[in-house]
Image (spheres, rainbow, N blue to C red):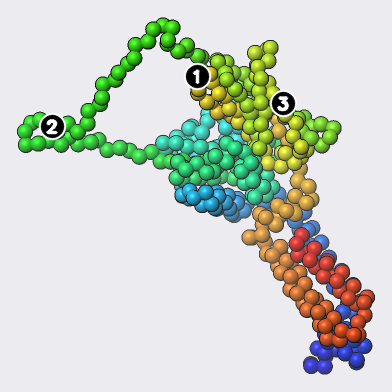
């Protein structure tokens, strides 16, 4: 046994200072074997049925991951973490189901029902609440990053007033193309105030504990009185977002907004991009911006647009603005493989097993090469060192990919 190990691993005179484990034919065999293993893993990912990616276990794991990422973010900001609430999970599920059933993507459904409707249907009694939506993602970290990039969605994630959260991710169709819908709900439960009891003394006269001060109104002349401004009124039905590819691998985003009243400023946010709006001669607010992304990249996670309208009276109105249409992508082979690793790693050991195999052999051949070089430093075979380095490079790539 000792002589066999020496022959295969230790360079010495009997093996011509060439450990048998590093012979050229063996190196070629190892390389072929490792590439074959990777091909089997990749082929498994590419031909995996779509239903596997949206199983209940996979969706539940991704929901937990998003809540975990949300609470990690809040902890870094010194904020309290959010408790998962079963009623908020239900309201998020009702919203996601509604989008999938009616094949729309908006904070308001085709019947005009918004967040409050789904919260009330779920029976969640709230004082404040918020909602993040997304569609069509392939990786949960990519989805969360898209929410981080959008100012309004990011504000929901770090809003210090929220105490609870709920989430739903479900498969569905959009324009009859398979996709994934995600709804993330936030809330603060309403505290039911008890009626204050009247404290009485020994007499029949109650103790008066607070007195509302009388209002003092300043009398102004007509010239001194501030002029009343009309608050902004936003029409969701005739406002929309659209897009088109350019010839330079860029994307043109356009917004058309129907808003009346006295407007100081208006703009639309989509992720990290802003579209300034100006009043057009047709009475509509319009704007366009060119972004350095292709439509395939931009719609890897579909996000809703948010319009912000600042009224002349100082009021600020934030509303959803819908896309005329969005791009639902067919998953590329690379995206399918990435999706298989991220979504199925917990449930399918083939990915972790193959990665561990590469790591073990990476360490094994690194040690063999170190012994080859260091034990008889004056007796080297350059081609052995080069081909072993090539094998280590292949193993490293297989491990990382």
Question: Residue 39: percent from the left, percent from the top?
Answer: 81, 61
Q: Residue at x 57, y 41 (%)?
A: 154
- Residue 342, can we see it? yes
Q: Position of residue 107 (x, y in %)?
A: 57, 32
Q: Quadrant of residue 373?
A: bottom right
Q: Residue at x 71, y 62 (%)?
A: 351
Residue at the spot of label 3: 288
Helix, strand or loop at mark 1: loop
- Location of residue 11 in the rendering, given as x and y in whole percent from the top left corner: 86, 87
Q: Which mark is residue 212?
A: none
Q: Residue at the spot x=75%, y=41% of the render?
A: 297
Q: Nearer the viewer's eye, disc 3 or disc 1?
A: 1
Give the number of marks.
3
Q: Is residue 25 above or below residue 143?
A: below
**Distance from Cα at disc 3 to Cα at disc 1:** 26 Å
Question: From this viewpoint, is residue 233 visible?
Answer: no
Q: Please, what secondary structure does the residue beneath circle 2 have?
A: loop
Decide which of tag 2 and tag 1 comes sooner along the chain.
Answer: 2
Check the image and name the residue furthest to the top: 222
Q: Position of residue 43 (x, y in %)?
A: 79, 58
Q: Check the image and name the residue furthest to the left.
A: 203
Tag 3, which secondary structure? strand
The residue pinned by badge 1 equals 313
| Residue 337, quarter of the rendered image | bottom right
């Amino acid at each position: 046994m000792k002589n066999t190990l020496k022959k295969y691993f230790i360079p010495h005179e009997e093996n011509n200072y060439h450990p048998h484990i590093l012979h050229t034919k063996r190196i070629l065999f190892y390389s072929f074997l490792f590439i074959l293993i990777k091909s089997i893993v990749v082929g498994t990912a590419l031909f995996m049925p779509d239903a596997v990616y949206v199983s209940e276990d996979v969706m539940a794991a991704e929901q937990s991951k998003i809540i975990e990422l949300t609470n990690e973010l809040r902890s870094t900001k010194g904020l309290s973490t959010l408790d998962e609430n079963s009623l908020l999970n239900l309201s998020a599920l009702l919203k996601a189901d509604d989008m999938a059933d009616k094949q729309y993507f908006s904070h308001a459904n085709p019947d005009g029902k918004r967040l409050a409707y789904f919260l009330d249907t779920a029976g969640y009694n709230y004082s404040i609440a918020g909602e993040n939506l997304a569609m069509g993602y392939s990786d949960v970290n990519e989805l969360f990053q898209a929410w981080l990039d959008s100012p309004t969605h990011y504000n929901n994630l770090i809003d210090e007033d929220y105490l609870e959260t709920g989430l739903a991710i479900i498969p569905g169709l959009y324009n009859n193309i398979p996709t994934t819908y995600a709804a993330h709900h936030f809330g603060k439960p309403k505290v039911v105030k008890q009626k204050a009891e009247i404290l009485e003394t020994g007499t029949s006269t109650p103790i008066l504990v607070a007195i509302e001060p009388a209002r003092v109104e300043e009398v102004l002349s007509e010239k001194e009185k501030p002029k009343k401004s009309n608050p902004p009124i936003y029409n969701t039905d005739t406002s929309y977002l659209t897009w088109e590819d350019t010839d330079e691998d860029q994307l043109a985003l356009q917004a058309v907004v129907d808003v009346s009243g006295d407007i100081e400023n208006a703009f639309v946010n989509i992720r990290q991009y802003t579209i300034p709006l100006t009043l057009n001669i047709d009475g509509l607010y319009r704007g366009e911006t060119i972004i350095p992304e292709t439509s395939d990249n931009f719609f890897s996670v579909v996000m809703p647009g948010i319009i912000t309208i600042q009224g002349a009276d100082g009021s600020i109105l934030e509303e959803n603005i819908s896309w005329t249409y969005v791009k639902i992508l067919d998953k590329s082979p690379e995206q399918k493989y990435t999706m298989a690793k991220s979504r199925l790693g917990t449930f399918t050991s083939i990915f972790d097993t193959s990665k561990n195999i590469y790591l073990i052999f990476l360490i094994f051949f690194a040690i063999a090469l170190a012994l080859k070089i260091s034990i008889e430093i004056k007796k080297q075979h350059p081609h052995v060192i080069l081909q072993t380095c090539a094998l280590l490079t292949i193993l490293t790539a297989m491990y990382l990919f």
